[in-house]
Every structure is written in C-alpha cells, then in structure tokens.
Amino acid sequence: MTDILLTFFIISLIYLSIANRLMAYVGNLVFQGLLICGIAILSLEHLTILNLSMILLETLVVKAILMPFFIRRVIISNKITRETEPSVPYYVSLIMTTVFIIGSYLIATSIESTTLNKSYFVAALSGLLSGLYLIATRRKVITHVICYVVIENGAFVLSLGIGSEMPVLVNLGVLLDVLVSVFLLGIFINKVGDVTGDGDIQHLNMLNDYPQTETEK
C-alpha cells in the first residue's frame, strides 16, 4: 500500500511539470498532503497517540489544508494571473521531471544500505529535484512558494525512509521552518504585487538602490 501512495506522489510531480494553472498547483499540494499523511501513518511501526497527532497536524492540517488555503488566498487577494507562465516549454519540463525520476531510481539502486528504504528515497529525491527545477523555470513568485512546499514534502518523505520511528522533534523544527518561510514569502508576495501587479519575477530586474534621473523618468 505504501508503494502505491509513493507512486501517486511521483505521478503528482509529473502532473506539476505540465500544469499551466496556479489553482492546479494548489490542488496538487492538497493531494500531496493527503498522500504523505497516509504514507506516514503506514510507515510507523509503533503508532502512538502522540505520533498520530503529530502526523495529522503536520500533514493533514498544515500541508493539506492551511498552506493551500493560505496560498490560494494570496493568489486571489493579489489578483495574480492564473497562468504559471514557465520560461521553458511544458514538454521540456515533462522530460526533465522524467529524467529526475529515472536518475533517482538509478541512484537508489546503487546505494547499499539496510536502513534506507529505496522506494522512499526515489520519491523523496524526485520531489527535491523536481521542486528545484520548477523554481528555476517558473516566472511567478507564488509558484516558487508552492514548489518550496513540494521540496519540503520530499524532505519529509526522505525522513520517513531513513527510519521507521517518527522523528518528532526534527519534524517540529521542519514544520516551524516551513510555516515561517511561507508566511514571510506571502507577505513578500503582497508587497511585490503592489509594485509588479502579477508577481512576475522579471519585474524585479527593474529594482535598484539608485534614484532615477530626470531622463530615466
């Protein structure tokens, strides 16, 4: 069952590479949050009330509900264009994501370790690489925030693959880091939206520390 959920997680990365609407990205975050919630519950050998509470808080409440709701609200309040506006064609992103998945599988098969679950490693590394690639090839700041959460989802899956016990303190630290980062980036997007209108990162090229001369105005 866990392998099926990990497969769907990888499929969600492929879908992200070809999705052209921001709301599709937000919906994908909800889907990934539900997936890693199921993966985490199935991965624990000793499921206690504390572990179950932490899983539901970090995955179901935060990743599947709060973060997508917050990001969707930022998109609507700033009237950001719903298109993702990639800097490369969608088929190139699809090819690169497929390469990352295949490369992750090849790396996993070459690792000899009794403590590392290779299925988790493939899904986690694919999420990390795909998230970084999408950040580099998408023009909107809000898309970078979404892909940052995808990277964190990959890191969470990797933490599950390293050990069977839930590292509560580590996940609390990661969760706090993600919450602070997303909220700060949300504030940043609100300010950028006041200047650029749609959050396109290319408009940031016009920012500088020097006052404009009369001719530049």
Image (cartoon, rainbow, N blue to C red):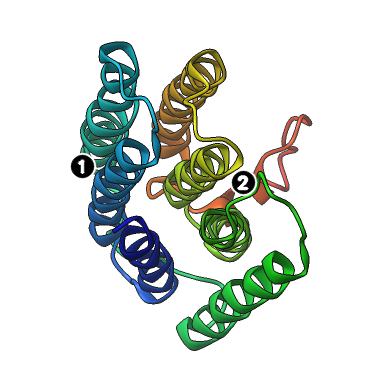
State the SS at label 2.
Answer: helix
Among the two numbered marks 1 and 2 on one chain, the one whose residue lies closer to the N terminus = 1
Q: Is residue 98 above or below residue 177?
A: below
Pointer 2: what residue? 204
Q: Quadrant of the N terminus?
A: bottom left
Badge 1 crowding class, 10 Å Cα cut-off, few under 14, some 14 to 19, many 20 or more, is few
Q: Quadrant of the C terminus?
A: top right
> For the point 45% across and 29% down, which residue is it?
182
Task: Using the rendered view, name the quadrant where residue 125 is placed.
Answer: bottom right
As rendered, which of 33 and 27 lies closer to the eye? 33
Amino acid type of the residue that numbered disc 2 sits on in the rendered structure: Leu
What x and y, as percent, mark residue 161?
55, 45
In the rendered structure, the answer to whether residue 214 lies left or right of residue 178 reads: right
What x and y, as percent, mark residue 172?
48, 16
> For the point 56% across and 41% down, which residue is it?
155
What x and y, as percent, mark residue 59?
31, 33
Q: Is residue 116 above or below residue 40?
A: below
As measured in the structure, the alpha-carbon distance from the residue carrying label 1 to the one carrying label 2 is: 21 Å
Pointer 1: what residue? 76
State the SS at label 1.
Answer: helix
Amino acid type of the residue that numbered disc 1 sits on in the rendered structure: Ile
Q: Is residue 155 above or below residue 121?
A: above
> For the point 73% across and 68% down, which residue is it?
107
